[in-house]
Amino acid sequence: MIFVLLVYYGLHQDFWNWTSARPLVFGFLPAGLAYHAVYTLGASALMALLVRRAWPAKLEAWADEEAD
């Protein structure tokens, strides 16, 4: 999972889109902005995956038992 996070962090550094606003995606959206829109959707999916896989359910159950 850490490898996936590091790769995704590396993809955030989109140096290949820094020099030009062309080509336009859908005729009006600069390539860098379109890339970051897709990147944001992917980041949301990655965070949902992290919450599902890495959430400390045992720790949360323990805290709920202590509250009772």
Image: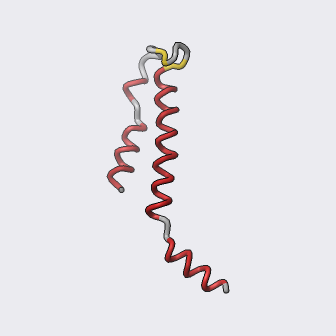
Which residue appears farthest toward the left when viewing the image? 3
Tell me which corner region of the image, top left, top right, bottom left or bottom right, holds residue 61. Answer: bottom right
Residue 21 position within the rendered picture, expressed as x and y whole percent measured from the top left? 48, 16
Residue placed at 35% from the left, 56% from the top?
2
Q: Quadrant of the C terminus?
A: bottom right
Percent x, y of residue 56 = 49, 70
Image vertical order of residue 29 relative to residue 47, above or below = above
- Seen in the image, is 7 located left or right of residue 30? left
Q: How is the image coloured?
A: secondary structure
65 or 20, nearer to the observer: 65
- On screen, residue 32 above or below 53: above
Q: Where in the figure is residue 15, as x and y percent of width and height?
A: 38, 29
Residue positioned 45% across, 64% down in the render: 54
Q: Which quadrant is the N terminus positioned in?
A: bottom left
| Residue 12 drawn above or below residue 49 | above
- At horizontal 52% and vertical 32% (from top left) the residue drawn is 37
In the rendered image, the vertical position of residue 34 relative to residue 2, given as above or below: above
Number of marks present in the image shown: 0
Residue 36 position, x and y percent, is 49, 32
